[in-house]
């Protein structure tokens, strides 16, 4: 029942000095542990061991992404992300379609840690499916896309029909501090356009400040104050 002891136990078994025997014990706990905590510590230990010893196989960790227990799948995805091996990207992309929201979240975060360029389409598909209703997922998708897509690729999302995809692209461009975010200032969805205003002003994206200063549109009072101050900073007769 003592978390400190459980933590020390899985870290001890993950130590390279324990060799394959330690990894085997962790894999056994991950698959057949009598409690969920026992299984999760097995998963975490496998992840730690695989990071410390690159020679260890990860197939059994990958297999846990298909486990009936949702939290086991989520933590297996987390460990694969922390390994930062591009070979695991297809497995994580599959988890983006999982029935459990927490598993989808962990898979998106993991793909961001991998920085997998080929995962951009899968991440945008997830944004379209669930991004509008899950703000936590939307934040994770923005961070993942910032690492998995170039500014030009994200700017191209301005023409997407899904406002959730466009919102995720704006968040990602803000993280990248890219002036391409200005392309979304005239978005048909006022929430997306306001997010672009906040991105430019709050993240101090100076190359996009003139575009922000020139916008003429009805927004909320805090957003209009950002635009007004951008005009003051840019200056000029206009």
Image (spheres, grey):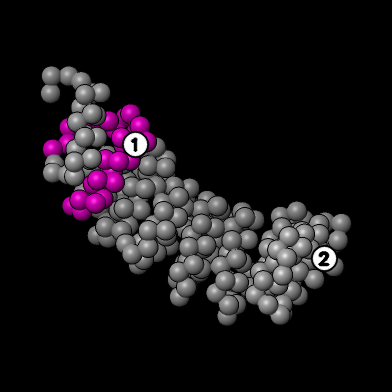
Give the quadrant of residue 10.
Answer: bottom right
Quadrant, the N terminus = bottom right
Secondary structure found at label 2: helix
Dot 2: within a 10 Å radius of its alpha carbon, few (fewer than 14), some, or many (20 or more) residues? many
- Work out whether mark 2 precedes mark 1 in sequence or the reverse, and give the earlier one: 2
Q: Nearer the viewer, residue 4 or 57?
A: 4
Residue 90 appears in view: no
- In space, the residues marked 2 and 1 are separated at their CA atoms by 49 Å
Answer left or right for 143 relative to 235: right
Residue 47 relative to residue 207: left or right: right
Q: Quadrant of residue 209?
A: top left
Say which residue appears at 77% left-offset and 63% top-offset.
5
Quadrant showing the C terminus? top left
Above/below status of 34 relative to 199? below
Q: Residue at x 37, y 48 (%)?
A: 171
Q: Position of residue 95 (x, y in %)?
A: 50, 69
In magenta segment, residue 7: no
State whether residue 59 is above or below residue 194: below
Give the structural element (helix, strand or loop) at label 1: helix
Instruction: Provide the residue designation for mark 2.
Output: 22
Q: Residue 163, how many percent across, how many down?
A: 26, 57
The residue depicted at 48 percent of the width and 48 percent of the height is 147
Disc number for residue 202: 1
Residue 224 picture quarter? top left
Classify 10 Å Cα crowding around label 1: few (below 14), some (14-19), many (20 and above): few
Q: Which residues are magenta?
A: 188-216
Q: Residue at x 59, y 61 (%)?
A: 78
Q: Main secondary structure of the magenta part?
A: helix
Q: Give percent across and percent down for residue 68.
A: 57, 80
């Amino acid at each position: 029942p003592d978390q400190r002891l459980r933590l020390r136990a899985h870290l001890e078994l993950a130590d390279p000095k324990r060799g394959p025997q330690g990894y085997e014990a962790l894999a056994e706990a991950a698959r057949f542990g009598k409690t969920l905590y026992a299984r999760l510590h097995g998963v975490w230990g496998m992840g730690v061991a695989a990071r410390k010893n690159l020679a260890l196989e990860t197939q059994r960790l990958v297999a846990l992404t298909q486990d009936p227990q949702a939290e086991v799948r989520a933590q297996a995805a987390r460990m694969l992300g922390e390994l930062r091996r591009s070979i695991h990207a297809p497995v994580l992309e599959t988890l983006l379609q999982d029935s459990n929201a927490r598993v989808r979240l962990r898979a998106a975060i993991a793909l961001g840690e991998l920085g997998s360029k080929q995962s951009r389409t899968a991440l945008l598909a997830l944004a379209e499916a669930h991004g509008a209703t899950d703000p936590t997922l939307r934040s994770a998708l923005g961070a993942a896309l910032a690492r998995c897509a170039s500014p030009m690729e994200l700017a191209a999302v301005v023409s997407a029909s899904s406002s959730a995809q466009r919102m995720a692209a704006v968040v990602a461009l803000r993280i990248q501090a890219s002036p391409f975010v200005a392309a979304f200032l005239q978005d048909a969805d006022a929430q997306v356009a306001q997010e672009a205003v906040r991105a430019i002003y709050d993240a101090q994206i100076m190359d996009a400040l003139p575009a922000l200063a020139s916008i003429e549109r009805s927004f909320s009072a805090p957003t209009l104050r950002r635009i007004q101050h951008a005009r003051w900073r840019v200056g000029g007769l206009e």
